[in-house]
Image (spheres, helix red, strand yellow):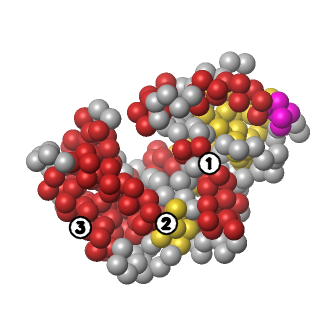
Amino acid sequence: MAFEPPQRLVRALGETAPGDGWLEKLPEAARQAVALRESTVERVQVPGGRSSLVVLVRRFDGTPAVLKLAPPRCRPEAERAALAHWGGLGAVQLLDEPVTEGVLLLERLHPDVSVRSLPEAKALLEAAGTLRRLWVEPPGDGNAQVFETVAERTGRQAEAMRATASGRAEVAPLVDAALAARSELLVAPPESRLLHGTFRQSKVLAGERSPWLAVGPDPVVGECAFDLARLVRDRVEDLIAQPSGAAITRRRIKRLAESLDVDQERLRGWTLFRAVESGVRARRVGRLQDAELLLEFAGWL
């Protein structure tokens, strides 16, 4: 079978890691991964993700599974460590396999059924309940060194934001506000937990052993409000389209903070930082429509 990467993956990696050669090596890497695990390929998941090739397979005993291949820059070994630590509680199960760098063998969920398919209020409720189960103490062994901290990750992002905003008066005030919020939030974080890192409704899929399970973490260690912040802006295009979008956003922050015992102002601050960071990054790589939506949303905060 030809393991052609979906166009969504090609575009995304072209924006963030052009010329690193991983895509060119991917078809052969996928063939080797399948052969090593004596698996039978059903199909490549399309449109798939922005950071990995997802292949639906059957293991040698006939059980369905997912083979996931990701480039080093997407930290697949951190994902492996996080999934192992969660042990299937709230997240997709990591299956036993020959360990190959950049390759994960995962429990098969229903790849085309995410919590985003539910009505908005129900989707937020189910997503928040799933996220709560992931917030555990980080591992105390050597695996802890695999994970970035919130301070480390946002520090890299802050540098890129400053560089992009330099001399651009139209985005500079929002960037300044986001960076100020980050500095204040890092002074005394209330807890340190293992976080999903990139959690949103589309990262929660229907399963068999549990109704909803999280997939695709980019794990990080830090406070829970950082993880919840990305969920606040889910369906941002719908929020922007509504005349009462700003008021709905404020109510969403309040409701999510109360339901998950997170400080409301800390959630607002991290929501601001993450929205501005995503908007500035989208602008930097030429996704101008996404940038406009995200920065308008950030302006409400």
The first of marks 1 and 3 along the sequence is 1
Residue 230 percent coordinates (x, y):
39, 57
Q: Amino acid at mark 2?
A: Thr
Q: CA distance from mark 1 to mark 3?
A: 31 Å
Is 134 situated above or below 168? Answer: below
In the image, 211 versus 185, the foreground residue is: 185
If the image is split into quadrants, where does the N terminus sit?
top right
Q: Is residue 27 magenta?
A: no
Q: Please indicate whether residue 214 sits to the left or right of residue 33 in the image.
A: left
Q: How many marks?
A: 3
In the image, 127 versus 23, the foreground residue is: 23
Residue 145 percent coordinates (x, y):
62, 65
Q: CA distance from mark 1 to mark 2?
A: 16 Å
Is 67 situated above or below 99? Answer: above
Q: Please indicate whether residue 301 sits to the left or right of residue 144 in the image.
A: left
Q: Magenta residues, as a range?
A: 34-39
- Give SS at disc 2: strand
Q: Please indicate whether residue 267 sits to the left or right of residue 212 in the image.
A: left
Residue 101 visible somewhere in the drawing: yes
Q: Residue at x 32, y 54 (%)?
A: 159
Dot 1 alpha-carbon crowd within 10 angstroms: few under 14, some 14 to 19, many 20 or more: many
Disc number placed over residue 149 in the picture, else none: 2
In the image, 13 versus 88, the foreground residue is: 13
- Give SS at disc 3: helix
